[in-house]
Image (tube, helix red, strand yellow):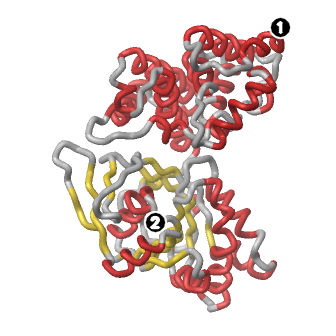
Protein backbone atom coordinates (compact mmCIF):
# COMPACT_ATOMS: atom_id res chain seq x y z
CA UNK A 1 0.00 0.00 0.00
CA UNK A 2 1.21 3.51 -0.82
CA UNK A 3 0.56 6.94 0.61
CA UNK A 4 1.78 10.39 -0.41
CA UNK A 5 2.09 13.12 2.21
CA UNK A 6 2.60 16.79 1.28
CA UNK A 7 4.74 18.43 3.95
CA UNK A 8 7.91 17.00 5.49
CA UNK A 9 7.69 19.28 8.52
CA UNK A 10 6.88 18.60 12.16
CA UNK A 11 3.24 17.57 11.79
CA UNK A 12 3.94 15.39 8.76
CA UNK A 13 6.87 13.54 10.32
CA UNK A 14 5.53 13.66 13.87
CA UNK A 15 1.89 12.68 13.35
CA UNK A 16 0.52 11.79 9.90
CA UNK A 17 3.58 9.91 8.60
CA UNK A 18 3.88 7.64 11.67
CA UNK A 19 0.18 6.71 11.60
CA UNK A 20 0.30 5.83 7.90
CA UNK A 21 3.54 3.88 8.29
CA UNK A 22 2.13 1.99 11.29
CA UNK A 23 -0.87 1.07 9.12
CA UNK A 24 1.34 -0.63 6.55
CA UNK A 25 1.70 2.18 4.02
CA UNK A 26 4.90 3.10 2.22
CA UNK A 27 4.91 6.84 2.87
CA UNK A 28 6.37 9.24 0.32
CA UNK A 29 6.91 12.69 1.80
CA UNK A 30 6.71 15.64 -0.59
CA UNK A 31 8.54 18.75 0.61
CA UNK A 32 10.70 21.72 -0.26
CA UNK A 33 13.74 21.10 1.98
CA UNK A 34 16.43 19.56 -0.22
CA UNK A 35 18.39 18.26 2.77
CA UNK A 36 15.39 16.61 4.46
CA UNK A 37 14.26 15.04 1.20
CA UNK A 38 17.75 13.62 0.60
CA UNK A 39 17.99 12.21 4.11
CA UNK A 40 14.53 10.62 3.96
CA UNK A 41 15.44 9.06 0.62
CA UNK A 42 18.78 7.79 1.90
CA UNK A 43 17.78 6.53 5.33
CA UNK A 44 14.18 5.43 4.77
CA UNK A 45 13.41 5.94 8.44
CA UNK A 46 13.59 8.40 11.36
CA UNK A 47 12.86 8.46 15.10
CA UNK A 48 9.94 9.95 17.00
CA UNK A 49 10.18 10.72 20.73
CA UNK A 50 7.24 11.25 23.05
CA UNK A 51 7.34 14.29 25.34
CA UNK A 52 6.70 12.24 28.47
CA UNK A 53 8.78 11.52 31.56
CA UNK A 54 10.38 8.41 30.03
CA UNK A 55 11.03 10.02 26.64
CA UNK A 56 9.71 6.88 24.91
CA UNK A 57 11.09 6.56 21.40
CA UNK A 58 10.23 4.55 18.29
CA UNK A 59 11.31 4.29 14.66
CA UNK A 60 9.14 5.24 11.69
CA UNK A 61 10.25 3.22 8.69
CA UNK A 62 9.15 2.38 5.14
CA UNK A 63 9.39 6.05 4.12
CA UNK A 64 10.90 7.93 1.21
CA UNK A 65 10.59 11.43 -0.24
CA UNK A 66 10.33 13.54 -3.40
CA UNK A 67 11.00 17.24 -3.84
CA UNK A 68 7.86 19.32 -4.46
CA UNK A 69 9.55 20.92 -7.45
CA UNK A 70 9.83 17.56 -9.22
CA UNK A 71 6.18 17.59 -10.28
CA UNK A 72 6.51 14.68 -12.70
CA UNK A 73 7.86 12.38 -9.99
CA UNK A 74 5.26 13.58 -7.47
CA UNK A 75 2.52 12.89 -10.01
CA UNK A 76 3.84 9.33 -10.50
CA UNK A 77 3.70 8.74 -6.74
CA UNK A 78 0.12 10.04 -6.55
CA UNK A 79 -0.89 7.82 -9.47
CA UNK A 80 0.20 4.72 -7.50
CA UNK A 81 -1.16 5.75 -4.07
CA UNK A 82 -4.33 4.86 -2.18
CA UNK A 83 -4.05 7.86 0.17
CA UNK A 84 -2.82 11.45 -0.19
CA UNK A 85 -2.51 13.60 2.92
CA UNK A 86 -1.36 17.16 3.57
CA UNK A 87 0.06 19.15 6.47
CA UNK A 88 1.26 22.31 4.74
CA UNK A 89 -0.96 24.95 6.36
CA UNK A 90 -4.44 25.72 5.13
CA UNK A 91 -3.34 28.84 3.25
CA UNK A 92 -0.77 26.80 1.28
CA UNK A 93 -3.24 24.25 -0.07
CA UNK A 94 -3.69 26.28 -3.25
CA UNK A 95 0.07 26.04 -3.85
CA UNK A 96 0.02 22.24 -4.11
CA UNK A 97 -3.31 21.99 -5.97
CA UNK A 98 -1.87 21.94 -9.51
CA UNK A 99 0.64 19.22 -8.62
CA UNK A 100 -2.06 17.11 -6.99
CA UNK A 101 -4.30 17.65 -10.03
CA UNK A 102 -1.52 16.46 -12.32
CA UNK A 103 -1.16 13.28 -10.26
CA UNK A 104 -4.91 12.63 -10.32
CA UNK A 105 -5.04 13.09 -14.09
CA UNK A 106 -2.12 10.70 -14.54
CA UNK A 107 -3.81 8.19 -12.24
CA UNK A 108 -7.10 8.32 -14.12
CA UNK A 109 -5.44 8.18 -17.54
CA UNK A 110 -3.58 5.05 -16.42
CA UNK A 111 -6.89 3.33 -15.72
CA UNK A 112 -6.45 3.25 -11.94
CA UNK A 113 -10.19 3.71 -11.32
CA UNK A 114 -10.43 0.23 -9.79
CA UNK A 115 -8.99 1.49 -6.50
CA UNK A 116 -10.31 4.72 -4.96
CA UNK A 117 -8.03 7.56 -3.95
CA UNK A 118 -8.74 9.30 -0.65
CA UNK A 119 -7.29 12.79 -0.17
CA UNK A 120 -7.17 14.10 3.40
CA UNK A 121 -6.16 17.72 4.08
CA UNK A 122 -4.93 17.36 7.65
CA UNK A 123 -4.91 21.08 8.36
CA UNK A 124 -5.91 23.22 11.32
CA UNK A 125 -9.13 24.63 9.88
CA UNK A 126 -12.72 23.96 8.90
CA UNK A 127 -13.47 21.87 5.79
CA UNK A 128 -9.84 21.82 4.69
CA UNK A 129 -10.28 18.88 2.32
CA UNK A 130 -13.21 20.61 0.63
CA UNK A 131 -11.06 23.71 0.14
CA UNK A 132 -8.32 21.55 -1.36
CA UNK A 133 -10.80 19.82 -3.67
CA UNK A 134 -12.06 23.15 -5.00
CA UNK A 135 -8.48 24.28 -5.66
CA UNK A 136 -7.58 20.98 -7.38
CA UNK A 137 -10.68 20.95 -9.57
CA UNK A 138 -9.72 24.33 -11.00
CA UNK A 139 -6.76 22.55 -12.61
CA UNK A 140 -8.62 19.47 -13.89
CA UNK A 141 -10.06 18.98 -17.35
CA UNK A 142 -13.83 18.49 -17.44
CA UNK A 143 -13.50 14.82 -18.41
CA UNK A 144 -11.19 14.24 -15.47
CA UNK A 145 -13.56 16.05 -13.09
CA UNK A 146 -16.32 13.61 -14.00
CA UNK A 147 -14.05 10.63 -13.33
CA UNK A 148 -12.66 12.18 -10.15
CA UNK A 149 -16.19 12.62 -8.82
CA UNK A 150 -16.53 8.84 -8.97
CA UNK A 151 -13.08 7.62 -7.97
CA UNK A 152 -11.44 10.33 -5.83
CA UNK A 153 -12.78 11.40 -2.43
CA UNK A 154 -11.82 14.44 -0.34
CA UNK A 155 -13.18 13.66 3.18
CA UNK A 156 -12.92 16.52 5.65
CA UNK A 157 -11.11 15.28 8.75
CA UNK A 158 -10.14 16.45 12.22
CA UNK A 159 -6.54 16.05 13.37
CA UNK A 160 -5.01 16.97 16.69
CA UNK A 161 -1.46 16.73 18.01
CA UNK A 162 0.79 19.45 19.43
CA UNK A 163 4.24 19.37 17.84
CA UNK A 164 6.33 22.34 19.00
CA UNK A 165 8.97 24.12 16.94
CA UNK A 166 12.26 22.39 17.67
CA UNK A 167 15.87 22.02 16.61
CA UNK A 168 17.41 18.59 17.05
CA UNK A 169 20.90 17.33 16.34
CA UNK A 170 19.34 14.86 13.93
CA UNK A 171 17.22 17.00 11.54
CA UNK A 172 14.76 14.15 10.98
CA UNK A 173 14.21 13.34 14.67
CA UNK A 174 10.97 14.75 16.05
CA UNK A 175 9.54 15.33 19.56
CA UNK A 176 5.75 15.06 19.92
CA UNK A 177 3.20 15.07 22.71
CA UNK A 178 1.80 11.61 23.56
CA UNK A 179 -1.81 12.64 22.75
CA UNK A 180 -3.10 12.47 19.17
CA UNK A 181 -6.48 12.24 17.46
CA UNK A 182 -7.47 11.74 13.82
CA UNK A 183 -11.23 11.61 13.13
CA UNK A 184 -12.54 10.48 9.72
CA UNK A 185 -16.23 10.41 8.64
CA UNK A 186 -17.21 7.07 7.10
CA UNK A 187 -19.96 8.74 5.07
CA UNK A 188 -17.36 10.57 2.94
CA UNK A 189 -15.28 7.47 2.15
CA UNK A 190 -15.75 5.60 -1.13
CA UNK A 191 -15.29 2.01 -2.28
CA UNK A 192 -13.09 -0.46 -0.43
CA UNK A 193 -10.42 1.02 1.78
CA UNK A 194 -8.01 -0.03 4.50
CA UNK A 195 -8.61 1.71 7.80
CA UNK A 196 -5.77 3.78 9.22
CA UNK A 197 -4.71 2.30 12.56
CA UNK A 198 -5.42 4.67 15.42
CA UNK A 199 -7.83 6.83 13.42
CA UNK A 200 -11.36 7.24 14.77
CA UNK A 201 -14.01 6.59 12.09
CA UNK A 202 -17.36 8.27 12.85
CA UNK A 203 -20.76 8.80 11.26
CA UNK A 204 -20.65 12.61 11.50
CA UNK A 205 -17.55 14.79 11.72
CA UNK A 206 -19.09 18.10 12.82
CA UNK A 207 -19.37 17.41 16.58
CA UNK A 208 -15.74 16.30 16.78
CA UNK A 209 -14.46 19.05 14.52
CA UNK A 210 -16.10 21.79 16.52
CA UNK A 211 -15.24 20.14 19.84
CA UNK A 212 -11.59 20.28 18.81
CA UNK A 213 -11.79 23.79 17.32
CA UNK A 214 -13.66 25.26 20.30
CA UNK A 215 -11.62 23.42 22.95
CA UNK A 216 -8.10 22.68 21.76
CA UNK A 217 -7.64 25.58 19.33
CA UNK A 218 -9.63 28.10 21.36
CA UNK A 219 -7.93 27.16 24.62
CA UNK A 220 -4.44 26.97 23.14
CA UNK A 221 -4.54 30.39 21.47
CA UNK A 222 -6.24 31.93 24.53
CA UNK A 223 -3.33 30.73 26.68
CA UNK A 224 -0.95 32.27 24.12
CA UNK A 225 -2.66 35.68 24.03
CA UNK A 226 -3.01 35.82 27.83
CA UNK A 227 0.62 34.75 28.19
CA UNK A 228 1.87 37.24 25.60
CA UNK A 229 0.48 40.18 27.55
CA UNK A 230 2.13 38.94 30.74
CA UNK A 231 5.50 38.54 29.03
CA UNK A 232 5.72 34.75 29.09
CA UNK A 233 7.72 33.04 26.35
CA UNK A 234 6.18 29.57 26.44
CA UNK A 235 2.68 28.17 26.82
CA UNK A 236 3.94 26.02 29.68
CA UNK A 237 5.17 29.11 31.57
CA UNK A 238 1.86 30.86 30.96
CA UNK A 239 -0.17 27.89 32.16
CA UNK A 240 1.85 27.78 35.39
CA UNK A 241 0.38 31.22 36.22
CA UNK A 242 -2.79 30.56 38.29
CA UNK A 243 -4.50 33.65 36.88
CA UNK A 244 -3.95 32.63 33.27
CA UNK A 245 -4.88 29.03 34.02
CA UNK A 246 -8.18 30.21 35.52
CA UNK A 247 -8.90 32.39 32.48
CA UNK A 248 -8.19 29.57 30.03
CA UNK A 249 -10.42 27.25 32.02
CA UNK A 250 -13.10 29.94 32.00
CA UNK A 251 -12.90 30.12 28.20
CA UNK A 252 -13.22 26.35 27.89
CA UNK A 253 -16.15 26.19 30.28
CA UNK A 254 -17.97 28.72 28.07
CA UNK A 255 -17.22 26.84 24.84
CA UNK A 256 -18.09 23.64 26.67
CA UNK A 257 -21.56 24.94 27.52
CA UNK A 258 -22.00 25.82 23.85
CA UNK A 259 -20.87 22.37 22.64
CA UNK A 260 -23.10 20.58 25.15
CA UNK A 261 -26.04 22.66 23.98
CA UNK A 262 -25.30 22.11 20.26
CA UNK A 263 -24.33 18.44 20.21
CA UNK A 264 -25.62 16.94 23.43
CA UNK A 265 -22.21 15.97 24.83
CA UNK A 266 -22.39 14.48 28.31
CA UNK A 267 -21.36 17.34 30.70
CA UNK A 268 -19.19 15.09 32.88
CA UNK A 269 -17.46 13.51 29.89
CA UNK A 270 -16.82 16.90 28.33
CA UNK A 271 -15.44 18.26 31.61
CA UNK A 272 -12.91 15.40 31.59
CA UNK A 273 -12.03 16.33 28.01
CA UNK A 274 -11.45 19.95 29.11
CA UNK A 275 -9.15 18.84 31.93
CA UNK A 276 -7.21 16.59 29.56
CA UNK A 277 -6.68 19.56 27.24
CA UNK A 278 -5.58 21.73 30.17
CA UNK A 279 -3.03 19.05 31.00
CA UNK A 280 -1.78 19.03 27.43
CA UNK A 281 -1.25 22.80 27.42
CA UNK A 282 0.68 22.49 30.72
CA UNK A 283 2.87 19.52 29.69
CA UNK A 284 6.26 20.26 31.35
CA UNK A 285 8.11 17.83 29.10
CA UNK A 286 8.37 20.19 26.14
CA UNK A 287 8.36 23.91 25.42
CA UNK A 288 5.84 25.45 23.04
CA UNK A 289 6.42 29.08 22.06
CA UNK A 290 3.73 31.65 22.87
CA UNK A 291 4.45 33.46 19.60
CA UNK A 292 4.10 30.25 17.58
CA UNK A 293 0.66 29.54 19.00
CA UNK A 294 -0.45 33.18 18.79
CA UNK A 295 0.70 33.77 15.21
CA UNK A 296 -1.71 34.68 12.41
CA UNK A 297 -4.08 36.65 14.66
CA UNK A 298 -6.25 37.93 11.79
CA UNK A 299 -7.05 34.37 10.77
CA UNK A 300 -7.67 33.28 14.35
CA UNK A 301 -9.93 36.30 14.92
CA UNK A 302 -11.91 35.81 11.71
CA UNK A 303 -15.69 35.16 11.92
CA UNK A 304 -15.50 31.41 11.27
CA UNK A 305 -12.59 30.71 13.57
CA UNK A 306 -11.84 29.62 17.15
CA UNK A 307 -12.62 32.80 19.11
CA UNK A 308 -15.27 34.85 17.34
CA UNK A 309 -17.41 31.96 16.10
CA UNK A 310 -18.06 30.35 19.52
CA UNK A 311 -18.58 33.78 21.08
CA UNK A 312 -21.21 34.72 18.49
CA UNK A 313 -22.96 31.35 18.73
CA UNK A 314 -23.01 31.45 22.51
CA UNK A 315 -24.36 35.00 22.49
CA UNK A 316 -27.19 33.98 20.15
CA UNK A 317 -28.14 31.21 22.58
CA UNK A 318 -28.00 33.47 25.61
CA UNK A 319 -24.95 31.67 27.03
CA UNK A 320 -22.10 33.28 28.97
CA UNK A 321 -19.26 34.81 26.92
CA UNK A 322 -17.27 36.79 29.52
CA UNK A 323 -14.01 34.84 29.13
CA UNK A 324 -14.32 34.53 25.35
CA UNK A 325 -14.69 38.31 25.09
CA UNK A 326 -11.64 38.66 27.33
CA UNK A 327 -9.58 36.33 25.11
CA UNK A 328 -10.62 38.27 21.99
CA UNK A 329 -9.68 41.55 23.68
CA UNK A 330 -6.23 40.17 24.55
CA UNK A 331 -5.74 38.80 21.02
CA UNK A 332 -6.14 42.30 19.59
CA UNK A 333 -2.85 43.28 21.27
CA UNK A 334 -0.66 40.61 19.67
CA UNK A 335 2.23 42.50 18.09
CA UNK A 336 5.00 40.23 16.82
CA UNK A 337 6.92 42.15 14.16
CA UNK A 338 7.94 38.84 12.55
CA UNK A 339 4.28 37.95 11.95
CA UNK A 340 2.81 39.78 8.96
CA UNK A 341 -0.77 39.40 10.19
CA UNK A 342 0.16 40.89 13.56
CA UNK A 343 1.83 43.82 11.80
CA UNK A 344 -1.29 44.43 9.69
CA UNK A 345 -3.55 44.10 12.74
CA UNK A 346 -1.68 46.69 14.79
CA UNK A 347 -1.28 49.07 11.85
CA UNK A 348 -5.03 48.91 11.18
CA UNK A 349 -5.85 49.58 14.83
CA UNK A 350 -3.53 52.59 14.81
CA UNK A 351 -5.00 54.04 11.63
CA UNK A 352 -8.69 53.10 11.92
CA UNK A 353 -9.31 52.33 15.58
CA UNK A 354 -10.19 49.07 17.27
CA UNK A 355 -13.94 49.46 16.66
CA UNK A 356 -13.40 49.41 12.90
CA UNK A 357 -11.17 46.34 13.20
CA UNK A 358 -13.85 44.51 15.19
CA UNK A 359 -16.40 45.38 12.52
CA UNK A 360 -14.34 44.62 9.40
CA UNK A 361 -11.85 41.95 10.48
CA UNK A 362 -13.84 40.12 13.15
CA UNK A 363 -17.16 40.57 11.35
CA UNK A 364 -19.02 41.84 14.43
CA UNK A 365 -21.32 44.78 13.57
CA UNK A 366 -21.22 47.92 15.70
CA UNK A 367 -24.78 47.32 16.89
CA UNK A 368 -24.03 43.80 18.12
CA UNK A 369 -23.70 43.54 21.93
CA UNK A 370 -20.37 41.70 21.67
CA UNK A 371 -18.89 44.61 19.71
CA UNK A 372 -19.24 47.01 22.62
CA UNK A 373 -18.08 44.39 25.12
CA UNK A 374 -14.87 43.74 23.16
CA UNK A 375 -14.17 47.46 22.75
CA UNK A 376 -14.71 47.94 26.49
CA UNK A 377 -12.41 45.00 27.24
CA UNK A 378 -9.76 46.39 24.91
CA UNK A 379 -9.97 49.82 26.57
CA UNK A 380 -9.53 48.31 30.02
CA UNK A 381 -6.46 46.43 28.85
CA UNK A 382 -5.02 49.63 27.36
CA UNK A 383 -5.14 51.10 30.88
CA UNK A 384 -3.89 47.92 32.51
CA UNK A 385 -1.01 47.44 30.03
CA UNK A 386 -0.21 50.99 28.81
CA UNK A 387 3.14 49.86 27.37
CA UNK A 388 1.31 47.40 25.10
CA UNK A 389 -1.39 49.71 23.70
CA UNK A 390 -1.15 51.11 20.18
CA UNK A 391 -0.43 54.76 19.43
CA UNK A 392 -3.98 55.09 18.19
CA UNK A 393 -5.48 54.57 21.66
CA UNK A 394 -6.74 58.13 22.16
CA UNK A 395 -8.27 58.45 18.67
CA UNK A 396 -9.90 55.06 19.18
CA UNK A 397 -12.07 56.52 21.94
CA UNK A 398 -13.42 59.15 19.57
CA UNK A 399 -14.51 56.51 17.05
CA UNK A 400 -16.54 54.40 19.47
CA UNK A 401 -18.64 57.12 21.13
Instruction: Note whether residue 140 is visible.
Output: yes
**3 and 204: which one is in front?**
3
Q: Secondary structure at mark 1?
A: loop
Q: Position of residue 364 (x, y in %)?
A: 76, 25
Side of 200 relative to 22 (left or right): right
Q: Secondary structure at mark 2?
A: loop
**Position of the N terminus by quadrant:** bottom left
Q: Is residue 108 above or below residue 401?
A: below
Q: Position of residue 157 (x, y in %)?
A: 54, 54
Picture quadrant where residue 326 is located? top right
- Identify the residue shown where x is 42% and y is 66%: 195
Q: Badge 1: how crowded within 10 Å, few (<14), some, or many (20+)?
A: few
**Position of the C terminus by quadrant:** top right
The disc at residue 401 is 1
Q: Is residue 258 above or below residue 187?
A: above
The disc at residue 344 is none
Q: Is residue 105 above or below residue 367?
A: below
Side of 73 relative to 289 (left or right): right
Separation (CA) of disc 2 from disc 1: 51 Å
The disc at residue 8 is 2
Q: Badge 2: how crowded within 10 Å, few (<14), some, or many (20+)?
A: many
Q: Position of residue 277 (x, y in %)?
A: 39, 34
Instruction: Note whether residue 114 is visible.
Output: no
Q: Position of residue 133 (x, y in %)?
A: 68, 64
Picture quadrant where residue 169 is located? bottom left
Given contact means CB atoms under 8 Å apart, are the residues at marks 2 and 1 in contact? no
Picture quadrant where residue 345 is located? top right
Q: Residue furthest left?
A: 54
Q: Earlier in the sequence, mark 2 or mark 1?
A: 2
- Identify the residue shown where x is 44% and y is 56%: 11
**165 and 261: which one is in front?**
165
**241 and 87: which one is in front?**
241
Amino acid sequence: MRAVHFGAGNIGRGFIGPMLSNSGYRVCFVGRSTSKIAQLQGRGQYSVTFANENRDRYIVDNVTAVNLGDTAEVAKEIAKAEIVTTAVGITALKDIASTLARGIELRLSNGEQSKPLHVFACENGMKSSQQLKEAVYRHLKQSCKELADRFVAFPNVMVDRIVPVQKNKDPLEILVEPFSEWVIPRSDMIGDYNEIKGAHYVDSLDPYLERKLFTVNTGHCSAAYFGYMEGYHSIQEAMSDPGIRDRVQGVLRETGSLLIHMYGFDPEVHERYIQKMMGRFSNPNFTDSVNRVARSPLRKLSPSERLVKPAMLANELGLETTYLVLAISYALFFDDTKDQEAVVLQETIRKQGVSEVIKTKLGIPVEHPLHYQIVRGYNKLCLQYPHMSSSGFQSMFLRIR
